[in-house]
Image (cartoon, rainbow, N blue to C red):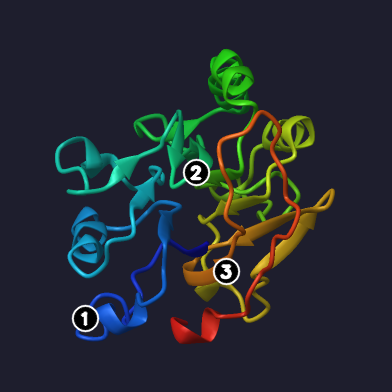
């Protein structure tokens, strides 16, 4: 399965005349947040691939104008094309008046509320978040700090891959697209990144066997 992960800033090659060509061969689009709803809706016009999203900390407008034709995975476990996707949007709370911000305790409570569904699903194949894991691709300032509770979640269920955004590619000349967390690939989807995930079917035990990451970022960056 070819997956396109996007986050934070629209890609010029995707939001324009080249969109249809750029999306050729893509089976699933995953948005890790902080993208205009009109951008996600635009993508659905040029591909049959499902577009699945979580909320970024700047996506309060989704409540009034959700992305049309897209699937909201935030706080849910979705089965899409045989792949189980767990979505946990939002960032660390650094302002008191934003809907899509959480304290560490609040995010841990969101995860705890999904335990029964996780057991019923036999885990998940993809963790789709906006914020990264604390200490794995985040920054020290609270506004771009990751969540510690994502670590135990990955350790418990061992999904195939984690996809996040929030720390933009443009923030640093030393941007790192890919990291490893205890053998699990962690991908920063900032702007756009394409990779292959093997075909899976609904099962009781998640697997990352056969995951192949493809260096396709140059097509979009």
Relative vertical location of residue 32 with respect to residue 154 in this rendering, above or below: below
**Percent x, y for residue 59?**
31, 45
Cα distance in 3D space between marks 1 and 3: 22 Å
Image depth: mark 3 or mark 2 in front: 2
Residue 129 position, x and y percent, is: 52, 44
3D distance between C-alphas at marks 1 and 2: 30 Å
Residue 80 lies, with reference to residue 48, above or below; the image says above
Residue at the far right: name it. Answer: 182
**Which mark sits nearer the N-terminus, 3 or 2?**
2
Check disc 1 and report the residue beneath it: 16
Circle 3 is placed at which residue position? 195
- Residue 188 lies left or right of residue 60; in this view the side is right
SS for dot 2? loop
Q: Which residue is mark 2?
A: 82
Mark 1 in CB contact with mark 2 (< 8 angstroms): no
Nearest the eye: 207 or 137: 207
Q: Dot 2, crowdedness within 10 Å: few (<14), some or many (≥20)? A: few
Nearer to me, 28 or 68: 28
Q: CA distance from mark 3 to mark 2?
A: 17 Å
Crowd around label 3: few <14 · some 14–19 · many ≥20 (10 Å): some
Q: Residue at x 22, y 43 (%)?
A: 61
């Amino acid at each position: 399965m070819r997956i396109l992960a996007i986050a934070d800033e629209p890609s010029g090659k995707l939001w324009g005349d080249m969109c249809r060509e750029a999306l050729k061969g893509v089976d699933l689009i995953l948005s890790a947040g902080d993208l205009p709803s009109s951008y996600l809706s635009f993508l659905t016009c040029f591909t049959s691939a499902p577009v699945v999203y979580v909320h970024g900390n700047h996506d309060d407008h989704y409540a009034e104008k959700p992305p049309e034709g897209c699937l909201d995975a935030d706080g849910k476990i979705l089965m899409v094309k045989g792949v189980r996707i767990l979505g946990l949007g939002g960032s660390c709370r650094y302002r008191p008046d934003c809907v899509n911000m959480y304290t560490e305790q609040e995010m841990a409570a969101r995860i705890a509320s999904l335990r029964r569904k996780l057991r019923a699903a036999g885990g998940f194949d993809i963790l789709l978040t906006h914020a990264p894991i604390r200490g794995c691709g985040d920054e020290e300032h609270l506004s771009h700090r990751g969540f510690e509770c994502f670590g135990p979640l990955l350790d418990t269920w061992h999904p195939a891959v984690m996809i996040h955004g929030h720390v933009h590619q443009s923030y640093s000349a030393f941007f790192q697209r890919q990291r490893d967390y205890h053998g699990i690939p962690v991908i920063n989807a900032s702007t756009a990144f394409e990779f292959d995930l093997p075909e899976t079917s609904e099962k009781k035990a998640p697997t990352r066997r056969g995951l192949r990451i493809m260096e396709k970022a140059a097509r979009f960056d």
